[in-house]
Image: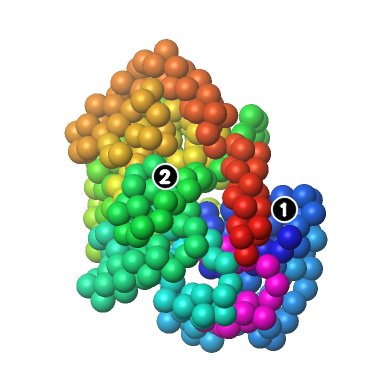
Amino acid sequence: MHLNIIGTRGVPAAHGGFETFADHLSRYLVKKGWSVNVYCQDDDGVFSDGEQDMWEGVKRTHFQAKRSGPVGTMAFDLKCIKHVLKEPGIDLVLGYNTAIFCVFERFKGRRILMNMDGIEWKRSKWGIVPKVWFYLNELIGANIAHLPIADHPEIARHVRSRCIKNPVMIPYGSDEITSAPTECLKAHDLEPNRYFVSIARIEPENSILELVQGAKSLPDGFKMMVLGKFKQENAYHNAVKAAAGPAVVFPGAIYDPEIVQALRYHARAYLHGHQVGGTNPSLVEALGAGNAVLAHDNKFNRWTAGPEQFFFSTALDAAQHMIRMCQDSDAVQAAQRAARARHQAHFTWEHILGTYEEVLMEQMHKA
């Protein structure tokens, strides 16, 4: 039982949702008797290309990205694909952004599972060339993988329309958070249950501007925390800051998981403006923290968060919901209970990783 994980920046997780998933899955499978190899991007030049080491029982294979940005990521992915051709086992590719490289795996007769992620080519931040690249690679990935994996029912329906295969639907998972210290709140002059928190990239498709505009209506004593990196040369970032009232706090990007967990856990509600994507990791993590949720009203968020949460389409909607959530503690508490129940039913790591192992075992027998 050997699995190669390709498509992330590596483990231990220090970046995004795929890294966190690879971290959990690799350690889980090792405990179950699997041999797991995770490809890792070496940004610091510590390892030579192809050098391997062990972490938590997981084999790591390192490659350097000689260039930054998308070109460097593509070069890194190609190195990983070339290397894995000589490795035993089956391959789990996380994301389809460079699915065209997987042609080499199919040519060598390797078994490929591919997590199809979100509908990347629909994201407004990309220009026409990246959109065409992502569109073509989505088609290639859905058809070249022996088994496409979707993390949301809507993504599964979308993938099914791109190929003749029937994708398996396995959502993202997260830990349950049942307690957190309050010290970090004092550094930002916050009180438990008296602030809203947004944790997302500062992009138009994440509705940050609408949420900040809505926060102008917050009653006295309530605040909005906007976690994320701002750049002075970015027009949208400047527009978000210009729209903010005194109740909005911009602490920048915070990567310490314990601080982020504490900011989630003690918030009155989590603000989730994502307009595109499948089961978003940050939203799942909010459910695991027992957060009431105010989310952008779309089919992706409605399925993930569940019907008991709050949904907005415009800045005015957001403002009205924020006011109600500040005033109606019963409604907020009901949403918090519903969040924990939905997380327990659908998004615990035990359930997600166990489902992945069943699927991987089936594919091992077919390899």
> In which quadrant of the rendered image does the N terminus lie?
bottom right
Per the image, is 258 magenta?
A: no
SS for dot 2: loop
Residue tagged by mark 1?
29
Q: What x and y, as percent, mark residue 100?
A: 42, 76
Q: Which mark is residue 230?
A: none
Which residue occupies 54% across, 29% down?
345
Q: Which mark is residue 152?
A: 2
Q: What x and y, as percent, mark residue 245?
A: 29, 41
- Three-letter amino acid code of the residue under disc 1: Leu
**Mark 1 Cα-neighbour bin, 10 Å: few <14, some 14–19, many ≥20:** many
| Residue 144 falls in image quadrant | bottom left
SS for dot 1: helix
Which mark sits nearer the N-terminus, 1 or 2? 1
Whether pointer 1 and pointer 2 mark residues with C-beta atoms closer than 8 Å, the reply is no
> In which quadrant of the rendered image does the C terminus lie?
bottom right
Q: As drawn, is 203 to the left or to the right of 329?
A: left
Q: Nearer the viewer, residue 223 or 26?
A: 26
- Three-letter amino acid code of the residue under disc 2: His
Q: As drawn, is 329 to the left or to the right of 42?
A: left
Q: What x and y, as percent, mark residue 187?
A: 56, 43
Q: Is 78 placed above or below 32 here?
A: below
Visible in this render: residue 49? yes
Query: Which region is colored magenta?
Result: 78-93
Q: What x and y, as percent, mark residue 340?
A: 54, 26
Distance between the Cα atoms at labels 1 and 2?
A: 23 Å
